[in-house]
Image: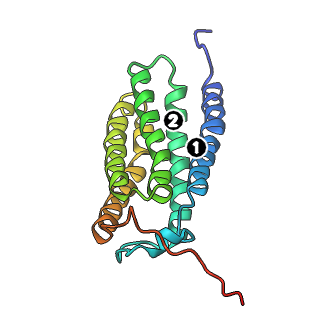
Amino acid sequence: MSEIATPGQLRMSYWRWAMITVPAIVLVGSLMGLVSNSGYDNRWFAALNLPAITPPGWVFATVWPLLYVCLGLSLAMILHARGAQGRGFALILFFVQLLANFAWSPLFFGAHQVTTAFYLIIFILMVTIATAFAFAPIRKAAAWLLVPYMAWLSFAAILNFQIDQRNPDAETLVPAAASTQIG
């Protein structure tokens, strides 16, 4: 027998990676959003002058987990491609963009750094494009799984830019604390 592993064994190895990468990315991404109080329940965010292109909250709650699933599957494909030329560099690029992605919500929603968050999302998009180009020679499907993410990052960058333009004082905007009338 000249085969090291059967096709079925290779598929199982990929799915083992995916059973780790998908939940890990979805969990960490969701936790970063939760910890930074991202979304419409954030009083600071609710006080911003939002552009008309701002989607309702349920869109973000639907899109991000789906994108994180795509990222996890893409990563599993590259992790599964042991011995592939360029794999190490491709993984470094992937993790750089992923860590930057995880930093965006705390920067935007937690620290209220709208301008810096815009520059960060541009950085994430550029590194993700480089990641897709690094993934393509290894596994084309892994690169294609990044396309919806890049499209959403492009939209998110436009949204972030418009929020920045409409709210030049966003970094210092702090809604008044709720008060109670006693007495």
Q: Is residue 168 above or below residue 105?
A: below
Pinpoint residue 42: horizontal percent, then vertical percent: 54, 68
**Residue 71 in view:** yes
93 on left or right of 43: left
Q: Residue at x 65, y 25 (%)?
A: 9
Pinpoint residue 63: horizontal percent, then vertical percent: 51, 60
At numbered mark 2, what does the secondary structure look like: helix, strand or loop? Answer: helix
Pinpoint residue 89: horizontal percent, then vertical percent: 39, 24
Q: Is residue 123 above or below residue 86?
A: below
Q: Is residue 27 above or below residue 167?
A: above
Label 1 crowd (10 A; few <14 / some 14-19 / many >=20): many
**Residue 141 in view:** no
At numbered mark 1, what does the secondary structure look like: helix, strand or loop? Answer: helix
Q: Which numbered disc flags the more N-terminal residue, 2 or 1?
A: 1
Q: Quadrant of residue 5?
A: top right
Looking at this view, name the residue that lies furthest to the right.
183
Q: Residue at x 62, y 22 (%)?
A: 6
Q: Quadrant of the N terminus?
A: top right
Q: Is residue 87 above or below residue 35?
A: above
151 on left or right of 68: left
Looking at this view, name the residue that lies furthest to the front.
183
Q: Residue at x 61, y 56 (%)?
A: 34
Which mark is nearer the camera, 2 or 1? 1
Pinpoint residue 74: horizontal percent, then vertical percent: 49, 39
Q: Amino acid at mark 2?
A: Leu
13 on left or right of 81: right
**Tag 1 residue:** 25
Report the front residue among 78 and 89: 89
Report the front residue among 110 and 39: 110
Mark 2 near mark 1, Cβ–Cβ under 8 Å? yes
**Tag 2 residue:** 75
